[in-house]
Amino acid sequence: MHKTNLAENIYYLGVNDRRTHLFENLWPLPYGVTYNSYLIVDEKVCLIDTVDRKFTDDYFQQLDNILGDRKVDYVVINHVEPDHSGSLAALRSKYPDITLVGNKKTFPMIQNFYGITEDTITVSDGDELDLGKHKLNFYTIPMVHWPESMVTFESTQNILFSNDAFGSFGTLDGGIFDDEINLSFYEEEAMRYFTNIVGKYCPHTQRALIKLEGLEIKMIAPSHGPIWRSHIPYILEKYQKWSSYAADKGVVIIVGSMYGNTEKMADVIARQLALRGIKNIRIYDPSKTHVSHIISDVFKYKGVMVGSCAYNNEMFPTVENALNELLHKGIKDRVLGVFGSYSWNGGGVKNLEKFSEQIKWEIVNPSVEEKGALKKDKFTEAVALANAMADKLEEDC
Ligand code: FEO
């Protein structure tokens, strides 16, 4: 098997997961995901994170392939979430003398997850662990993605082991470094990873970016997806953009429709937006498209329009679910318009208007509600709603 070096005596030890359908049992993995660990071989041997426990055997084979009979002295736990700490208990059985390195928030979690309380070193911001030639420094980045999350900086080669930060969905199908892959594919999957998994914590991500500004980073080695060495400003700029809620000119239209009447309104609105020169328009039916993709595009585009038919005097259930996820993510600074239709009683638009109040985005008014099929007067109102959105985007984008 190949040995992949980031630098002399610093190795990539990653595994591809092409079998799990849902990350965190929530988020689709159409292109899989990797769990990346790293190994530094020096006077002391040190692992940075581990991998999901489903892959422990593969992981240990890679480890043995490099180390032979040498033992691992340290394992740095940048993040306790089990996609990275899952092999810890097995690792401790393999190397009973191993010492765990984490911060003060790491070890209560490690005790809760694995019952491990001994052979630990607790580090604080800036502390150094000397491996011989290689030196590791630690910086906490709370809530990127959990309270105990931290990064590890190898200061002789200037490698940042960033854990979830700068990570991506998608397996590594041959290419491991950013100059060996199709970047546009991984940009989409890195954005979906950030927005779905870390996106609730944008202010924390902003604080983490400021904290890491002083480091002279030559390589970013995350715990998911490709290693960044030739496009570091590119991924840093993306993180800056995504975590500050900066958006491109475009509109995401989320529509729930039982018999096509509300969907027809969405098509009318989309056509009018296109006639106004907006090129980025995505219509999503959350009955078909997983909310993971909708969240990612709401981070991407400034305008959001939501249409719902009435369903038992409420909004359509799959639309309600998608909007709950958007509320949960706390995305800020978007422009919203709503519309819908009903058969025998309202409920769709009425509840969309309640959502409008909750999410606190700028609203384009008035909302449009039709009874049954779209007719001439409501067609005119739908066009006016689209024009109001286009006017707003012309001002803002
Ligand atoms: Fe990849 Fe928050 O774990």
Image: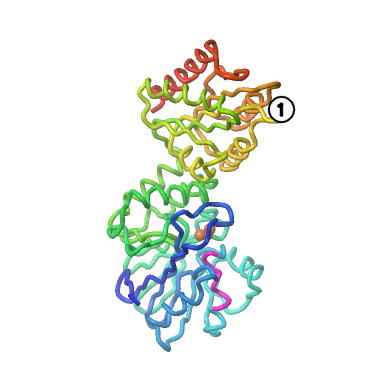
Image point (37%, 49%), residue name: 187
Residue furthest out toward the front: 259
Q: Secondary structure at mark 1?
A: loop
In the image, residue 103 lies at what x, y percent? 55, 66
Residue 354 colored magenta? Answer: no
Image point (50%, 36%), residue name: 284
Image point (53%, 38%), residue name: 331
- Image quarter in which the N terminus is found: bottom left
Dominant secondary structure (helix, strand or loop) of the stretch shown in magenta: helix
Q: Which residues are magenta?
A: 83-90
- Image quarter in which the C terminus is found: top left
Instruction: Pick whichever, 338 or 210, lies toward us.
Output: 338
In the image, residue 63 lies at what x, y percent? 43, 79
Q: Is residue 68 above or below residue 245?
A: below
- Number of dots carrying numbers: 1
Instruction: Pick whichever, 377 or 134, lies toward us.
Output: 377
Image point (55%, 39%), residue name: 286
- Residue occupied by mark 1: 313
> Residue type at mark 1?
Asn
Q: Quadrant of residue 146?
A: bottom right
Decide: few, some or many residues near mark 1? Use Cα within 10 Å; few <14, some 14-19, many ≥20.
some
In the image, residue 37 lies at what x, y percent? 44, 69
Instruction: Pick whichever, 335 or 266, lies toward us.
Output: 266
Residue 85 colored magenta? Answer: yes
In the image, residue 62 lies at what x, y percent? 41, 77
Residue furthest out toward the top: 377
